Image (cartoon, rainbow, N blue to C red):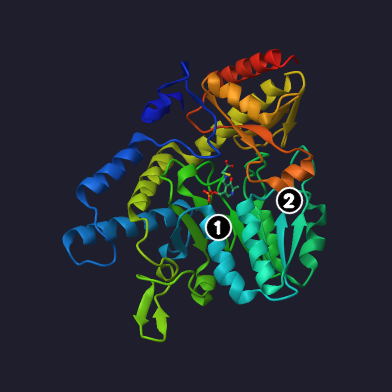
Amino acid sequence: MESLRKDFPILDQQVHGHPLVYLDNAATSQKPRAVIEALSRFYENDNANVHRGIHELSRRATEAFEGARDRVAKFINARASSEIIFTRGTTEGINLVANTWGVKNLKAGDTIVLTEMEHHSNIVPWQLLAARCGAKLAYLPVTGDDGLLDLSGLDGLLHDQSVKLFAFTHVSNTLGTINPVAELCAKARRRNIITLVDAAQSAGHRPVDVQEIGCDFLAFSGHKMCGPSGIGVLYGRHELLGDMPPFQGGGDMIANVDFFASTWKDAPHKFEAGTPNFADAVGLHAAMDYLAAIGLDKIARHDQELSAYAYERLSRLRGIRLFGPKKERSGVVSFLLNNVHAHDVVTVADQRGVALRGGHHCNQPLMKKLGVESTARASFYFYNTAGEVDRLIEVLTEIQKFFGE
Ligand code: C6P
């Protein structure tokens, strides 16, 4: 995997006089030359608005945009390209479901089940929907610092007839937990409960197969998987998309517009009002080709091995609190050093060229459950190395000395 670093021009630089060690991949990944060049090629040769013009460039751009949709369908094993809606990212995908499927199907007294490890993107849209229609929220608990879902109460929770939706993350962005998504979806399906999987931290990091998972909706972001920012995907099961109202109104999503009423195109175009982010869809296509050529299984194994190595080395530091599962974890490790604020850890590490993230990671409810305000977080991708983990440990040891641990 180390040989792949040469594909990422950004990694080869000094930051504050030290070689860059980029360990903030859960926030956003870096981009390989293949993606950067695909974007340049598109802008240099084919750029035009899609689905509108009948001139040659518009035809090429439309073909490239719809080709990207086909590539996504293949990447996540959707049954048809019409199940793939382009969005700005995971957040927009979840908001789309809340504002279309949710508004149409949920009513006062219904329950939306979430988990305590959800990102704000998979909490706040449901709170807004609940306030609008009178639905309630319920949460599947997290066990504690080892960060697993407590499945003991799940059957009881889903048994409640009022539960209409179960939305949960595939991989936690703070704990590194990999949730048993297929099992969760199967339990929900037996009770006709609709499922939404937040795949922001799993897509591009491990194989994501929507048929194997058995979900109704699944959302992810291009920028966390070597693709450009501002492009994401919402997968929706064909049978559901047909009955859902549009998300936004505007150009490209209509079949016919009259002064007082309009009709819509079928999915996915019904959900893509206005000029879509076609150029970045082309970049995402290149990212998927790039990742598939490496192999998603291989990437997952590398994430897991590096994270296990980091967890083991970190656990040997004095005065450290580690969060998340001890094994079977994704490439995310959160920790706190005694007497050092997470922001100080990140600031000093940055001065040594090591990019971490410190804060609540958009997981404020989880932080409250864990009894902390923030954590420091290292997150890995396939281009990170054991040598970079060693450098992280060296810098943390220095920080501990400095702060008198
Ligand atoms: N987490 C992190 O540093 P967007 O912003 O729409 O691309 O992704 C939102 C999102 C949703 N779910 C999960 C599990 C996520 O991790 C994220 C983004 C980043 O952890 C930024 S807060």
- The percent position of residue 388, horizontal first and vertical second, equals 54, 21
The type of residue carrying mark 2 is: Glu
- The percent position of residue 307, horizontal first and vertical second, equals 62, 30
Q: Residues within 10 Å of mark 2 (few under 14, many from 20)?
A: many
Mark 1, residue position:
218
Image quadrant in which you'd find residue 160:
bottom right
Residue sitting at x 57%, y 44%: 201
Q: How many marks?
A: 2
Which numbered dot is residue 42? Answer: none
Drawn side of residue 377 relative to residue 83, left or right: right
Mark 2, residue position:
116
Instruction: Identify the element where label 1 is drawn.
Output: strand
- The percent position of residue 309, horizontal first and vertical second, equals 63, 24
Image quadrant in which you'd find residue 398:
top right
The type of residue carrying mark 1 is: Leu
Looking at the figure, which quarter contains the C terminus?
A: top right
